[in-house]
Image: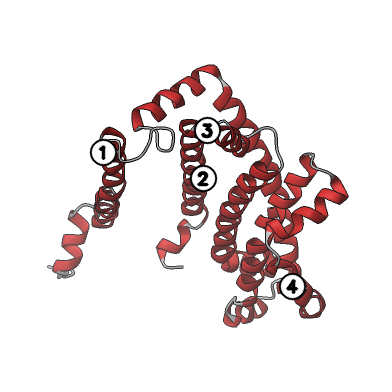
Amino acid sequence: MSAQPAVLPAAAHAATSPDRGAYAAFFGRSASFWLALPFPLGLLLLWQMAASFGWVAPQVLPSPQSVLTTFIELLQSGELLDNLKISFLRVLLGFGVGVAGGLLLGVAMGLSPLFKDYVYPFFKAFSQVPVLGWLPLLMLLVGIDEALKIILIAKAALVPIAVNTYKGIENVPSRYVEVARVLRFSRWQLLWRVIFPAALPPIWNGVRYGFTHAWLALVVVELLASSEGLGYMIVFGRQLFQLDVVIAAVTVVGVVGYLGDQALARIEVILLGWRRSGF
């Protein structure tokens, strides 16, 4: 009788036990959620107490119920959704321009040392100027129409995307390139099958940072130079001393920004799922 191959206990247990990695990920997310919950609940309770006991005047700090009522009214009237749509389209267009420009610039600097030597010092100085620093000049050049908002949003997104793309390509391990050359990869094969996949994690981090910066720039631009959008709602509410409108709009800004980042995080899991396999 032929001897049967021995099965290691750990291997047998791993073959019959459920995927403990999935359980660990699920319970890890649950633990993070419950650990993060007390702070916003405590803040909400303190807010309610301040409104109920009159610690702060209602004109300065409306109650949570008042803000919720205003939010529902804005939602039912369509005013909130209309302004949200305008803001979302602005950030989508500006972010798209920033992604395209950031990727092109980052790839060029990462692949061409000569181009990097000429462009990077200027780009570094350009990136140090905040979005608001460009506002007066651009108002003179393009006015206060949509072009101003799109340019500033694109600038905010372009910088982190270009930097992360450049650094990601620059830091691709040299052994990957050496193996590709041994396999006689063409230049395009080297780019698409080696360099870009290896640089994709930092590039995608740059995209997520770029979205965050673009969303913040959108709100700032709408606060200063807009007659529509969520930022305008905040300004309009402040001017009329309707702080319930201000708080409702600020809450929507935070929630939409968070959901946008989470959507990009989900896409990252799909694009970079190969990293979990150890390759």
Residue 52 vs residue 121: left or right? left
Looking at numbered disc 4 in the image, what kind of residue is underneath it? Ala
| SS under mark 1 | helix
Q: How crowded is mark 3: few (under 14 residues within 10 Å), some or many (20 or more)?
A: few
Mark 1 or mark 3, which is nearer the start of the sequence?
A: 1
Name the spot of residue 56 as percent of width and height, x first: 35, 40
Q: Distance between the residues labelled 2 and 1?
A: 28 Å
In the figure, is residue 101 to the left or right of 195? Answer: right
Give the image location of residue 117, x and y in percent.
79, 80
**Which amino acid does the dot numbered 3 rest on?**
Phe
Q: Mark 4 points at which residue?
A: 125
Could you say which is closer to the camera, residue 75 or residue 204?
A: 75
Q: Name the residue under label 1.
A: 49
Q: Name the residue under label 3.
A: 241
Task: Give, as a three-letter code, the residue at label 2.
Answer: Gly
Closer to the observer: label 2 or label 1? Answer: 1
Q: Name the residue under label 2.
A: 257
Query: How would you rate the neighbour count of disc 2 (Cα within 10 Å): few for under 14, some for 14-19, many for 20 or more?
Result: some
Q: Quick check: 267 above or below 238? A: below
Neighbours of disc 1 within 10 Å: few (<14), some (14-19), many (20+): some
Q: In this view, does 48 lie to the left or right of 3?
A: right
Residue 18 placement (x, y as % from top left): 21, 52
Q: What element carries label 4?
A: helix
Label 4: how many residues lie within 10 Å, few (<14), some (14-19) or many (20+)?
A: few
Q: Position of residue 89 (x, y in %)?
A: 66, 36
Q: Is residue 69 above or below residue 135?
A: above
